[in-house]
Amino acid sequence: MANTKRSLEERLNEGTVIVGEGYLFEMERRGYLQAGSFVPEVALEHPDVLKQVYRDYMNCGSDVVLAFTYNAHREKMRIIGKEELLEPLNRNAIRLAKEVAKEHPTEEALVAGNISNTNIFDPEDPASKDQVRAMFAEMIQWSKEEGVDFINGETFYYHEEAVIALEEIQKQDLPAVITLGLMAENKMREGMSVEESCRILSEKGALVVGMNCFRGPDTMQPYLKKIREAVDGFVGGLPIPYRTTEEHPTFFNLPDGGCSCSLPTETTFPTSLDPLYHNRYELAAWAKEAQELGVNYIGLCCGASPAMIRAIAEATGNTTINSKYSPNMEKHFLFGKDESLKTHNQDYRTKA
Ligand SMILES: [Zn+2]
């Protein structure tokens, strides 16, 4: 397989494609990105850090290196007063992704450009739609010039904004993965169901349609089922790794009953979600279930760690570059079964 690189479509036809996302949270957790403004300046300020995270995700099974340009659009850069960084930031995030993708020892990883909800889309305001279109067009153009394999348009909660994204991707002849972010109202902002939105996007020619972010596996899976039933083409699902509930379906309003201090934020989002994590085995169980359901493009979003990505990759039948470091308790001094281990230590299994 060395020196060959299958397209996204070829990989989807042959099996499950694994995708690690969630760079905003991972960079913030590592200390290189400000929660709140959530702008990926790290691509310019600390390219080595971004490259390492790209590498960590790829080595733990991500088939795609998604360029970290989430929120790196003209409107966001204007708000923070750094519009002049817009183009260099976009280009650098992609170049770094390409460098890492080439490091893959058996098959070069795919590189995706990234666009997302602009937060200025207003269904009642035609001028806002033109502005959104122009913001997408320039980011897609830079992605194309830098040689990405496809574009991922994500976390759209307006159906029409997702359609604009798809149209702009298609204008530049790139494959499109469009994933929607479903807020707690459980439907698109216009009132359309998420499966209907996906059906339309798929029929319009998106290679993959589905959902990402905002919701954990438990509150995303029922909608992935509906999407799978409504759509003939490929379906994607990339939840956040948190224990969302029917009462609190997104991570924007997830309470932590055990918190012993007052938080500086109204909710646990975005910097106090840690106690609400799913463990990797729960995520692996979800990924297997999603694969059995017929979801083709499986990943994790904000909050994901490389080890979690490896767990979902392995659960769906993949061996990753770093699978040699996957958990194996055989030789652990307390819990191991190896015969050379001292049995007296095993008392601590229950007493430690
Ligand atoms: Zn996310």
Image (spheres, rainbow, N blue to C red):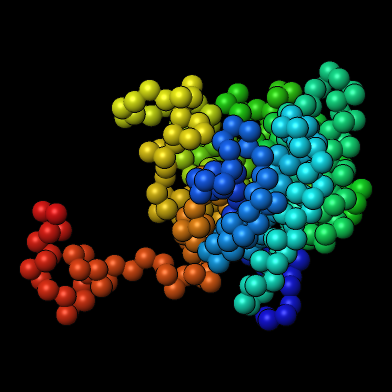
The correct choice, above or below, for 188 with respect to 12 in the image is above
The correct choice, above or below, for 249 with respect to 175 in the image is above
Nearer to me, 264 or 244: 264
Place of residue 283 in the rendered image (x, y in percent of width and height, measured from the top left): 46, 50
Place of residue 132 in the rendered image (x, y in percent of width and height, measured from the top left): 84, 33
Nearer to me, 282 or 352: 352
Q: Would you say residue 22 is visible in this rendering?
A: no
The correct choice, above or below, for 220 with respect to 324 in the image is above
Q: Quadrant of the C terminus?
A: bottom left
Q: Quadrant of the N terminus?
A: bottom right
Q: Which residue reaches farthest top?
A: 124
The residue that appears at 66% across and 44% down in the rendered structure is 40
Q: Would you say residue 76 is visible in this rendering?
A: yes
Nearer to me, 256 or 47: 47
On the rendered structure, is 72 left or right of 295?
A: right
The residue that appears at 72% across and 32% down in the rendered structure is 80
Place of residue 240 in the rendered image (x, y in percent of width and height, measured from the top left): 53, 42
The correct choice, above or below, for 336 with respect to 212 in the image is below
Place of residue 93 in the rendered image (x, y in percent of width and height, measured from the top left): 72, 54
The residue that appears at 74% across and 70% down in the rendered structure is 6
The residue that appears at 38% across and 23% down in the rendered structure is 262
On the rendered structure, is 260 left or right of 351?
A: right
Q: In this figure, what is the number of numbered marks?
A: 0
